Amino acid sequence: MHKRRRSRELAMKALCQIDVQNPGNCENLQQFFPENEPDDTVKKQAVEWTRGVVRNLTACDELISDAIIKWQLSRLAMVDKSIIRLAVYQLKFCPDIPPKVAINEAIELAKKYSSKQSPHFVNGVLDAAFKKLNRKT
C-alpha cells in the first residue's frame, strides 16, 4: 500500500480516537502512532496531518457544516466525520495535495472503513466543500 494512503488511514484512525477521548488533544497519541505503524515516514506524515486537523478543527468543521445539507456535524458517524475532516484539512491547508487526490483518497477510506452509502456521502460533502473553498479564493 502506498505510504501516503497508509498515513491517511493512520491519521483517520487517530482522529477517531481524539474524537472519542478528548477533541483538541493530541497528547494521548504519543503511544498510538508507534503502536500502529512501524514506518517512520508514514508515522511522521500521519502525525503532521492529525495535528493539522486538530489545530484547524474550527475552520474545518465550519466548512463541513456549510457543505452538509439538512444534516448536523454532530450527527455524522465518527468514521465519516474523521475522513471528511482529514480531507477538508488537505483541501484547505495542503496545497501540495491535488484536490482530486484528497477527495478520491477520502472516498477510498469510506469504502474500506464505513457503510455502503458513505462513499457517496463523503464525495458529496467534499465536492460541496471544495466548491465553497474555490468561491472564497
Image: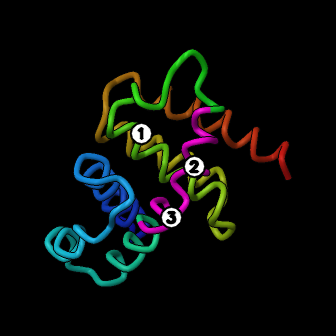
Residue 43, horizontal then vertical, whole percent: 32, 76
Residue 108, horizontal then vertical, whole percent: 42, 44
Q: Nearer the viewer, residue 69 or 110?
A: 69
Return the residue at label 1: 81
Mark 3: give few (<14), some (14-19) or many (20+) Cα within 10 Å. Answer: some
Question: Circle 1 sits in a helix, a strand or a loop, which is it?
Answer: helix
- What segment carries the magenta color? 51-65
Identify the amino acid type marked 3.
Answer: Arg
* Residue sitting at x 24%, y 69%: 29
Question: Circle 2 sits in a helix, a strand or a loop, which is it?
Answer: helix
Could you tell which of marks 2 and 3 lies nearer the N-terminus? 3
Identify the amino acid type marked 1.
Answer: Lys
The CA distance from mark 1 to mark 2 is 11 Å
Could you tell which of marks 1 and 2 lies nearer the N-terminus? 2
Identify the amino acid type marked 2.
Answer: Cys
Mark 2: give few (<14), some (14-19) or many (20+) Cα within 10 Å. Answer: many
Task: Tell me, for residue 55, which label it has, or none.
Answer: 3
* Residue sitting at x 22%, y 67%: 28
Task: Give the image quarter of residue 68.
Answer: top right
Image height of 69 relative to 125, above or below: above
Mark 2 and mark 1 in contact (Cβ < 8 Å)? no
The CA distance from mark 2 to mark 3 is 10 Å
Image height of 105 relative to 35, above or below: above
Please give left or right for residue 129 compared with residue 37 in the image: right
Q: Residue furthest top?
A: 70
Q: Is residue 59 magenta?
A: yes
Mark 3 and mark 2 in contact (Cβ < 8 Å)? no
Disc tally is: 3
Task: Give the image quarter of residue 35.
Answer: bottom left
* Residue sitting at x 41%, y 30%: 74
Q: How is the image coloured?
A: rainbow
Q: Main secondary structure of the magenta part?
A: helix
